[in-house]
Image: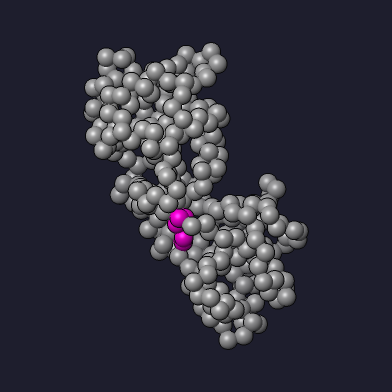
Amino acid sequence: MQIYPTMSPLELGGKQGSAVALGYFDGIHIGHRSVIGGAVDWAAAHGAAPAVFTFKLPAGSKIKGRRLFSAEDKHRLVAGLGVEHYLVPAFEDIQAMTPDQFVRGLVADCQARAFFCGENFTFGAKAAGNPALLQELCAPLGVEVHILPMAQYEGKPVSSTRIRAALEGGDIPAANGMLGAPYAIRFPVRHGQGLGHTLGVPTINQIYPDGYQLPRYGIYITRTWIGGKAYPSATGLGSRPTVNDDPAKVTCETFIPGFSGDLYGADPVVEFHTYLSPSKKFDTLDELCACIQNAARRAQEYFQ
C-alpha cells in the first residue's frame, strides 16, 4: 500500500481511476470496514484502484478522543483490507477547504470515479459538508457516491466512542465485536523490575503511550503473537498494587506460559479476549504468583 502524507496525485499505474473510501477511520471497526470494503469491491469490479482518504490530527489533539491504534497499526489494518493507496494529509492542510474545494481537489488527485462514505460523514471547513452535499457536488463531475448505513452492534450504531467505553468497562467481547477483530496492542517490550523472573512467572512489560485509550485495570485472558505463532497468555494492566510504590505508574505485563526467549525491544502483538478480575493488592508475593499462574491456566483452557 502506497502512503501519501500530503494532498497529491495518486500513482495509479494504469488503473482506470480510483474508488475512494472517505472518513477518519480511527477504530477500523466494522462500520469502517464496510465503507472501505465497498470501495475495494467496486474498484475490483471496475478496473480501478482502491483508495482511502483520511487525515492526521495534530499531536495531542483531543478532537476525536483517545487513540485506539498507532498510525502504523492503522496502516497495517487498512492494507490488509486490500487498499492500495492511502492519503493521510495533516488536518491543518485541509481544514480551511470549502466542501467544493475539497471535492474538486480530491477528484482531481485521485482520478476518482466513486466515493464511499458513512451516513454520518462530514467534510470541508467547519464540517459544512454531508453525504447529501457530496452527492450534489459529485453529480456534475460524473463521480458516483455510495452512502453506507452505520453498522449496528446489539441494536445500536457502532462508533469508536462506544468501543472506548467498552474498553473502559472491561467489556472486551463488545469491543471486539464492534472492531471486527480482537482489540490488540503492539508496543515495544521494556525492561521492568525483573520480579516475574524471580517468582518463576517472567512477564513482558509494555507501556501505553500518552493519548491512548486504556482498558479497565485488571487481569485479562490474552493471546500473544510472536514470530507468527500465537501463545495463550495472561495480562495484568494497572498500577501493580502489590509491589509498586507509585500508584500513578501504569504498566501492562503479560505472562506467556511455554515461551522462553528475549523479547526486549521487540513489539509482540497482545490480543485481549476476556476480562477476568480487577487488580488487587496481595499480602504476599506467593499469592501474587498463584494469581498469575491461575490466570495463565485459564487462558490455556480458553484457547483449547
Residue 206 appearing in the image: yes
- For the image shown, how many numbered marks are present on the structure? 0
Residue 149 appearing in the image: no
The x, y position of residue 160, in whole percent, is 38, 49
Instruction: Indicate the quadrant containing the C terminus: top left, top right, bottom left or bottom right.
Output: bottom right
| Near-viewer residue (266 or 78) | 266
**Residue at position x 48%, y 57% from top?**
210
**Vertically, is 261 above or below 83?**
below
Instruction: Indicate the quadrant containing the N terminus: top left, top right, bottom left or bottom right.
Output: top right
Quadrant assignment, res 141: top left
The x, y position of residue 97, in whole percent, is 31, 30
**Vertically, is 122 above or below 186?**
above
Q: Is residue 278 magenta?
A: no
**Residue at position x 62%, y 72% from top?**
292
**Residue at position x 26%, y 38% from top?**
126
**Residue at position x 46%, y 27% from top?**
51
The x, y position of residue 242, in whole percent, is 57, 80
The x, y position of residue 10, in whole percent, is 49, 21
| Near-viewer residue (119 or 264) | 264
Q: How is the image coloured?
A: one colour
| Near-viewer residue (2 or 9) | 9
Q: Residue furthest bottom?
A: 283
Q: Magenta part of the protein: which range?
A: 211-215
